[in-house]
Amino acid sequence: MNTFLVTVGVGLATAAILALSAVAFTLEYAVSRIANFAHGEFLTIGAYVAYSTQGIFHENVAAAAVIAAAAGAAAGLVLNVLVIEQFRGRSAITVLIATLGVALIAENVLTMIYGAANVTYSFAQGNLHHVGPFLWTTSDIEVIISALVVAGLIYLLLQRTRFGKAIRAVSQDRALAQVSGIPARRIIMQTWALAGAVAGFAGFAYAATIGTFGPLLGFNFLLLTITATVAGGLGRPYATLGGALIVGLAIQIAGTYTSSAYELVFAFLLLVLLMLFRPNGVFVRRSSVAVRA
Amino acid sequence: MLLEIESLTKSFGGVHAVRNCTFAVPEGQVLGLIGPNGAGKSTVVDLVSGFGQPDSGRVRFAGESIVGKRADVISRLGLIRTFQAPREWRNLTVMDNVLLGRRRFADESVWRCLTRARRIRRAEEADRAAVRAILERFQLAELRNELAVRLSGGQKRLLEFARVAAAEARLIILDEPMGGVNPVLGVRIGEAVRQFAAEGRTVIVVEHNLPFIESTCQQVVVMDLGEVIAQGPFSGLRDNPRVVDAYLGMDQSHG
Amino acid sequence: MYWVSVFTEAGIFAILALGLDVVWGWTGDFDLAFYGYLALGSYMTFVLTIGKPTPPVEYIIGWHLPVLLSIVLAIVVVVGFAAVIGAIALRNLRGIYFAVTTLGAVSAMYLLVENYTPLFDGFNGVYGLVNPGQTALNLTYNGYRIAFGVVVLIVLFLAYLLVQRLSRSPFGRMLRSVREDERAAAAYGRQVFWAKYRSYLFGAALAGLTGGLFAIFVSAFNPSAWTPQELLVIYAAILVGGRGNPRGVILGTFVVYVGFIELTRYLPSPASRPDFGPALRQVLIGLMIILMLRFRPEGVFRERPGVDSEREPARPLPSDAVGALAPAATGGPGVPGVPGVPEGQAADDGGSS
């Protein structure tokens, strides 16, 4: 039982990072109606920029996190302006392919700058702590807490602020929102910057957890992100958190009982199952049978 | 009776789109299906043609039950339907669009197309000749090698009729064929419907354009709020208080 | 010899591109599992030809069949695999959902192969298929490579003939109607799932064949050789050459594989960073994908629908002038398409969105 709870604890840490990435992905989908396959690159860029600047603030984790978020925000803005908006009105698949192209570019630019080999953070992992039945390192705890804080902030943002209302309006009907006086384009840009920031931070957190990473960090995390998003339901930020929790826990538990190498195999099988039986999310009562995206 | 619909019912999330719909169509008749917006006419068409599953009820086509069958299965039985907006295959030529209306399904297999290409091409000639004649009839012959996407709205409507004609169906259901159609085109469409009838085909026309219904249909079924409220020749409808009420009451009760 | 290698590789991937174009170009399904089919085809060819593994190397089967037979069996296995994935993914999923599901399936497969060493020796991969039959044919190493290159080009040509014939057949026409509008296709009696499924299996068969040829070409195969990114290069080739146009697809593949390789050969690569050049090539490919999609999604050579020509046209039709060049009897093959058809958003945004 003890090991199970420890496993759950690790799963929670994974779920926390996954939740951040998934919420960002869902925001991008909600506001632009596309699946951003370059989303993983926000994470990678955040991780690498934090790596490049880790000396500047003497391995201060908080500073690195802020830098990573800023880098992610910039990446989000650039992607939106240079690519997403250029493909307005095109089919979702076309944009998906375009974002795949962006992912290819981003991964390889990073390879050109940093090399294909893995790099390592010099941030301290921190000691292990017993928090109730769970066993976490300091950074695990920081990640979980920050994930909760960010999730809470996003909730407040979406529900309580005018910005949040505007996002919801634009995600429902861009033209209508524009006509009602909402500066849709600006809202979209800001949302992408926000999503990029969250994703950049998640990338840093993820990289800090594993310590060593390469240019494919984010892309490999992308499928996991998509699984969590689909589990919650595309375009629904709160349900996405639930989805991330389910996915994070499920793969951790499954991985412990077979081998951690197979974690991701379970994740992807879970994804396929979700697509077949619950394409609109686990929390929907009745899912439509035919999903024509 | 070629088509028999009995107690067809369908709800969407608590709203009854179709409720206890019952009527029958004898072979060779041209039947109009009319009613104000939201009456459930298009839903009935979808349910009958396999583009939706009814909650309950029976549908028989040529004596055979077709409830729950897939759209392509029903189509192969000889029931062809159109859609409210013309659904041409945009990046195929006009010729290909109408050719695909022909029922040459057996030749559409990978094996046959690879091993018997020449024989298939020869067999297809007969179809092509027939299609050219149909295109002549609808005055699309000159456009037969144009991509369908480049046709005007009216030409797309005619293309749809040509495709229907090519299918040589037993029962044709036209879903609002006069939508956005100018009077000249409307005359041609009326002729096309009469031609179908002359060939012995059964036609159901779902329409808002009442003069068109009057001039082409022998019998009319009127629906309102998901139910059939009247059946009979068009002339009798004007005196039917329920029908008048449904159409006049549109502004008040149907919003 | 360098050029032999380059053209052989391009030829092999042209076959893959033809298969992928059937699935994406004609039928409209954006699939991300195809490189997995190539990989499986390669792996199977290896384990059926190179005999029993010597520990610590491990892999399944380990027969000693003639390589041609191995390739045939490999294709069968690949089609079987695609049959499962296709049955799952094609039934109800379209667009993004379909793409994601295929990506999930192939990623699961990738990880399984990478981690479960009894299958194909995990990360080390399989190796040892060096020029099968070279001694039997009494060839030098280089002689074999040249002969193999010629064989690949011949196979490519045969594949092209097959695909072209299929493209202009009722099957090809039917697939495109499914791509353009599934509902209308169903309304006219087409079984949408079966159409997509058959096209998927046909493409997968070509992918399996490619895998077999690739196995001979590289003589070793491991997980680093296949990732979803590799498939993107093939999509780039299709995008450039012309979606739905077999000739264009082949041309596009050669442009990307031969042209881009050559282009990046002349780009500087710092001595300490051997991965710089290849990375730059990928960047350019990514750029090309985006630019093609944005400005010319139908590719250099557009999809050419068959032109209908009659024996004696009633009146001279401008579009028939081109058709009259072909043998008129049965509107034979090789009838050139209608030139100068502008825009039309050919095969880009149709259907699958």
Image: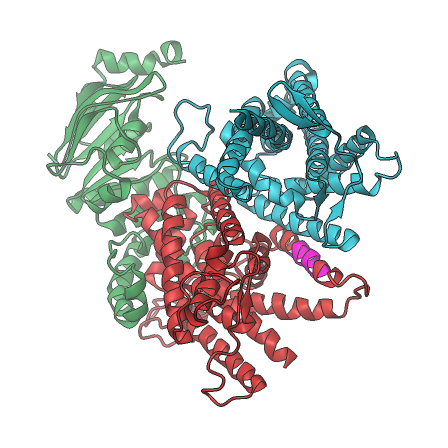
Chain colours: A cyan, B green, C red
Determine the residue located farthest toward the top in the rendered image: B252
Q: Is residue A47 left or right of residue A178?
A: right
Instruction: Residue B200: name its quadrant.
Output: top left
- Residue C337 visible in the current orientation: no
Q: Is residue C281 magenta?
A: yes
Instruction: Residue A186: name its quadrant.
Output: top right
Q: Is residue C114 above or below residue C88?
A: below
The residue under the point 74% across, 40% down is: A47
Residue C291 lies, in percent from the top left, at 66, 53
- Residues B217 and C125: in front is C125
Residue C185 lies, in percent from the top left, at 34, 47
Q: Is residue A247 left or right of residue B110?
A: right
The residue under the point 71% across, 53% down is: A108
Q: Main secondary structure of the magenta part?
A: helix
- Residue B220 visible in the current orientation: yes
Residue C16 lies, in percent from the top left, at 49, 64
Q: Is residue C246 magenta?
A: no
Q: Is residue C202 left or right of residue A125?
A: left
The residue under the point 27% across, 63% down is: B129
In the rendered structure, which segment of residues is drawn in magenta? C280-288
